[in-house]
Image (cartoon, rainbow, N blue to C red):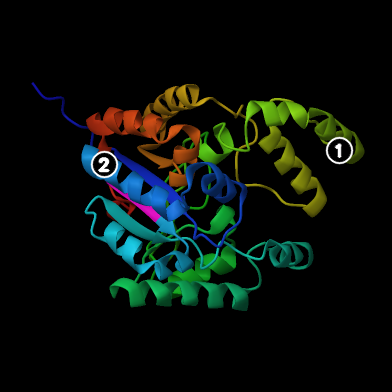
Amino acid sequence: MATKKSKKQVFITGDVHDSQLRGYDSKWLKRYHKMDEIDCALKYGELAEKYKIPVTLFFTGRCLSEQKRMQSLQLNSFVEFGAHTYNALQPSWLHLIFKLFLKSYYGPLKFQLRDILKTQKIFRNFNGDNIQLWRTHAYQSNNNTLDILRDQSFKVISDDVRLDGSEISQVRNGLYSVPINTPPDHENLYHGFFNETRLKENKMLMHSLGSIFRVSPTAANGIRFTKELIKKLLGRRPKVDLTKPVAYSVTDYFSHLKKETEEALARDGYAMILLHPGCMEIADKMNGLEDFFLYLGKFNVSFLGDAELR
């Protein structure tokens, strides 16, 4: 007898950046895998189709200039598109200035409006649809972002990370927030440049900086240390929960994620999962992801656009 699936929804999401972004993951993919993030998204989509797992991928607007590859993704009935700013908030030095002087990394209202409209336009030109799902690069939205998204008829934003209890809520008239309530891969999974050896090599530097800026370093947690240091330097309060341990091997991460997924469903009534195609490829060429998709077969996995908004 087949097991009856729960009505509680699981959402699988990933963020995809264009090849002009020169972050650590992009460099690693190019150097060691001869791929970019759109290539990874295509492979991710193939796995989603194989296991019949709907996934929602948030693309930067510049990804859509890759017409042929993006059209292949659009034709995949198990891939839903969301928007992820136009160019992943580049150049970063400009956004650091915004943060220092305006207390908003995304930037002032007019800058955000221009970015969102530009992103909307390129999606509309690509497929004729009005994009309705949004995740700001690095979760860097604020009240201005919410106002603009509402005015532009967006339906869902997924920027908050709340690992100890969350709910789907209406943050503006017609605009709902669906927070990430399971541990995101990028901050919690050893992959590429973020590996155990590199963290050990940086231990001395972390302790030195920690003593200067009065930040308590954790040798096994370079990302948490960095976020605490940024918070001290820029007065930033990261939305990511810094109280839980991070940095797992692929096997341990997915074992932990399965447990957290079931806890989120029981606690919050839904599970929002963030698994970047690039991270999944770098970590183990998506073998762990394939096993996770197989595990998800017993759950009610939905497109984010089909979320039961309440």
Marks 2 and 1, how far apart at CA: 44 Å
Looking at the picture, which amino acid does disc 2 mark?
Answer: Ile
In this figure, what is the number of numbered marks?
2
Between residue 46 and residue 59, name the one nearer to us: 46
Secondary structure beneath label 2: loop
Percent x, y for residue 220?
A: 69, 25
In the image, the segment drawn in magenta is 53-57
Percent x, y for residue 98?
A: 72, 67
Residue 218 shows in the view: no
Question: Residue at horizontal 66%, vertical 47%?
Answer: 238
**Quadrant housing residue 264:** top left
Marks 2 and 1 in Cβ contact (< 8 Å): no
Q: Residue furthest right?
A: 212
Percent x, y for residue 200?
A: 73, 26
Q: Which residue is mark 1?
A: 209
Between residue 231 and residue 85, name the one nearer to us: 85
The rendered magenta stretch, by its main secondary structure, is classed as strand
Q: Which mark is residue 53?
A: 2
Looking at the picture, which amino acid does disc 1 mark?
Answer: Leu
